Image (cartoon, rainbow, N blue to C red):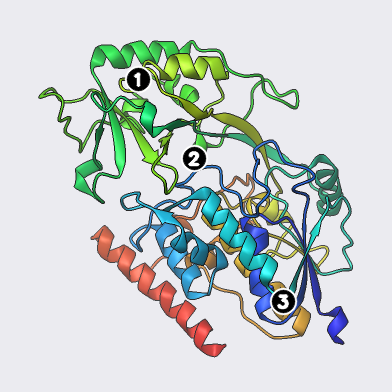
Amino acid sequence: MDNNTKKIKIIGAGLAGCEAAWQAAKYGVNIELCEMKPSKFSPAHKNADFAELVCSNSLRADGIHNAVGLLKEEMRCLGSLIMDCADATKVPAGGALAVDREAFSKLVTEKVRSHPNITVTEEEVTKVNPDEYTIIAAGPLVSDALANEIQGLTGESYLHFFDAAAPIVSYESIDMSKAFKAARYGKGGADYINCPMTKEEYLRFYNALITAEGAPVHDGVENPKVFEGCMPIEVMAKRGEDTMRFGPLKPVGLDNPHSDERPYAVVQLRQDNAAHSMFNIVGFQTHLKFGEQKRVFGLIPGLENAEFVRYGVMHRNTYINSPKVLDNTYRMLKYPKVYFAGQINGVEGYVESASSGLLAGIYAAKTVLGIDFTPFTADTAIGALSNYVSNRSITNFQPMNVNFGIISDLGKRVRDKKQKAEMIADRALNEIEKYTKAL
């Protein structure tokens, strides 16, 4: 194979596409990274930079005692571009990994554009040649033209669900005489702003929320299927009067310094940028009309005069029926030179999306170069995801966040959950270490 044929085309410069490009380029493979921005944007994206995030805490909990924390540590060990940039641009968020979104995207863009083996092409891709090595990382908001092309390649009907982004308010507009800074149970310092509610205030807000007017859903879908992990707050509220109080508005672990009365419910806001000027309303992804958001969320104590820097929005996410289409290297069964990376293949979440790009980039590069390899096993979090999306015994495939349930069992009973998580993590990181040493 001459050097000119050692090439991979990657479609989409989101987290998965950038990670795939970075990993494959490290092997000396020539990468053409195609991105339709800035000439064309999806409904959810506004920034011309790569790897654009919707909210600051998109990378979720840190620490190996939870599955996504383990996944992030595995990615760090494997030289992840996304994790490197996230760690460099993080902002305070208790036990979670939150980033300054603009600084993060800018850093990813600078690193990708400056890599000598990566060429960026700014154009929308509408056709895929199955005889060329290609990684499709177009994201869940894939353009209609490329969506039709992918549907032709897969031969499978699309499944879609709708998810939503939470609104962001300016810090200076929050009434801190009613709100207070604290983290639940004192974990991580005072990284959150908390808006406590009495029962009367909560019921007033609840009744306004369940009767508020939603924005029209595009694509002619009147009853969109909502992904459980990113449920609009108004949908959650309609499941019962106390559902929110057992979810994002739970009042436990917080003492209101303004009152001796225990809060009946608490709305939390999380820092969204390094400048401490914007805060994301935690768990308040929504599809309400903008005017309704201002009216209803203005009933929350401390947010009566809140300035909305960004209103919540809802958009379509699209994914393929991966168990019938892909193997455990994210490669198509029908067209072995074509790979998928990111949320379009049914891994849910930014971290999971980037991790699939990491593996697709490594696996595709090794295949192009004729290097033998063994895919990561389900003993690791990163391997468990690739095995989940390629599990042909699944009959009703749904998007999945990484979790300990899809990672291989230890084979013995361990009562202590923390100890069990540590044992799973030790086993996973040992496999990752063996791989890195072999390089």
User: Does residue 149 appear in this view?
Assistant: yes
Question: How much space separates mark 2 and mark 3, taking CA atoms?
Answer: 39 Å
Q: Secondary structure at mark 1?
A: loop
Q: Amino acid at mark 3?
A: Pro
Which of marks 1 and 2 precedes in the sequence?
Answer: 2
Q: Position of residue 190 (x, y in %)?
A: 25, 44
x 68%, y 73%: residue: 115
Q: Which disc, if any, is residue 1?
A: none
The image quarter containing residue 300 is top left
> Which of pointers 2 and 1 indicates the residue nearer the eye?
1
x 16%, y 25%: residue: 258
The foreground one among 80 and 175 is: 175
> Which of pointers 1 and 3 indicates the residue nearer the eye?
3
- Residue under pointer 2: 229
x 69%, y 75%: residue: 25
The foreground one among 37 and 403 is: 37
